[in-house]
Image: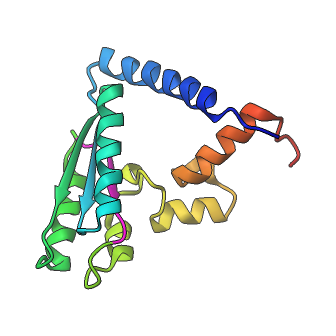
Amino acid sequence: MILDCQTIAETFDAEIQIAVKRLTDSGVIPKMCEILATQTQGTLSYSNTKKRKAAKFGIEYEAVQFGPEVHLNEVLENINQLNRDDRVHGILVGMPTYPHIDSEKLVAAIDPNKDVDGLGPLNSYFVFSNQEHRGIAPATAVAAIHILEKLMSLRGK
């Protein structure tokens, strides 16, 4: 079976543009912040891709870059500030992080309602307890399900 993922992606992009327009029409400018405690080129390149995609949709995107000398507590405090900022709707962590930065602690510090990747403890609990409707499921898994739903019925599967 050959999958036409380009058409699926274009349809999904159109749905995102409609959702963002609804938000902006109601006075909400969606904003996402990515924590980058890394100098890994692949991670930084992927972050730039997310920035371009967000701009295409009218979503504000901010990458918060930390140097290799950063301490875990400094990054955690930044996440706590973003959690309290009502202008920030989503937070994610670019991985891998520096070896001395515990990425699990960073992800766990993100407010579950702002956990874009759905990897925090509460959102993970919801997924593993078959209650994903109560939280945010991991984006890659949601994308895979979205593609499958465009191709076939998943009812009973």
Quadrant containing the N terminus is: top right
Identify the image quadrant of residue 12.
top right
Identify the residue at horizontal 25%, vertical 59% (top origin): 35
Q: Nearer the viewer, residue 66 or 29?
A: 66
Identify the residue at horizontal 19%, vertical 69% (top origin): 75
93 falls in the magenta region: yes
Viewed as shown, does residue 30 lie left or right of 113? left
Q: What count of labels does the image hold?
A: 0
12 falls in the magenta region: no
Direction top: furthest residue: 25
Over which residues does the magenta segment extend?
Answer: 88-96
Determine if residue 10 is in view.
yes
In the rendered view, would you say 134 is above or below 38? above
In the rendered view, would you say 75 is above or below 29? below
Viewed as shown, does residue 99 lie left or right of 141? left
In the rendered view, would you say 47 is above or below 107? above
